[in-house]
Image (cartoon, rainbow, N blue to C red):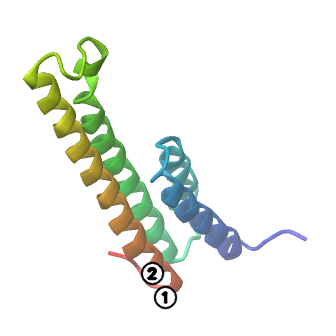
């Protein structure tokens, strides 16, 4: 027995929220969350609130990946200099930690907001 499309879309969005939560620990799962949400976003017969949830996940996964890449740039000097060698290396590292915390808290906030709306079966925008 095959699943109906609304059931399959809900499973994709649920899996996407699971991967979005796991993206708090590794960035690769943010790409998986984006990919699963994209499957629902391009479907023509998706319900409106599910479609809004998919677009919400896609948008915020991209924003999180951009924030994480920006935070990772601040750690580049650590590959060439020791932590205690120059004050600007310490400053770059501290800035990287701050931007990483911002990216992590952003994803946690977005996940919580989106998942609570998903449980209520409402559009998240």
The label shown at residue 89 is: none
Name the residue: 34% across, 49% down. 64
Is 105 in front, or is 3? 105
- On the image, the x and y values in percent for residue 44 come to 56, 64
- On the image, the x and y values in percent for residue 43 come to 57, 61
24 on left or right of 5: left
Badge 1 local density, few (<14 within 10 Å), some, or many (20+)? few
| Residue contact at pointers 2 and 1, CB within 8 angstroms | yes
According to the picture, the residue beneath numbered tag 2 turns out to be 116
Q: Is residue 23 above or below residue 8?
A: above
Name the residue: 54% across, 77% down. 47
Q: For the residue labelled by badge 1, is the local secondary structure a helix, a strand or a loop?
A: loop
Q: Residue furthest front?
A: 84
Q: Nearer the viewer, mark 2 or mark 1?
A: 2
> Residue 65 appears in which quarter of the rendering?
top left
CA gap, disc 2 to disc 1? 6 Å
> Residue 55 appears in which quarter of the rendering?
bottom left
Name the residue: 8% across, 24% down. 87
The answer to whether residue 125 of the structure is visible from this angle is: yes
The label shown at residue 120 is: 1
- On the image, the x and y values in percent for residue 25 come to 48, 49
Name the residue: 43% across, 81% down. 117
Q: For the residue labelled by badge 2, is the local secondary structure a helix, a strand or a loop?
A: helix
Is 106 in front, or is 59? 106
């Amino acid at each position: 027995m095959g699943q109906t499309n609304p059931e399959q879309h809900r499973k994709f969005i649920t899996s996407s929220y699971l991967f979005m939560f796991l993206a708090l620990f590794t960035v690769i799962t943010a790409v998986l969350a984006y990919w699963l949400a994209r499957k629902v976003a391009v479907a023509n017969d998706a319900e409106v609130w599910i479609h809004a949830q998919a677009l919400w996940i896609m948008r915020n996964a991209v924003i999180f990946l951009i924030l994480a890449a920006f935070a990772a740039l601040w750690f580049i000097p650590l590959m060439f200099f020791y932590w205690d060698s120059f004050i600007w290396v310490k400053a770059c590292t501290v800035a990287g930690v701050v931007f990483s915390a911002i990216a992590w808290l952003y994803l946690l906030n977005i996940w919580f907001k989106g998942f609570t709306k998903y449980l209520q079966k409402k559009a998240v925008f």
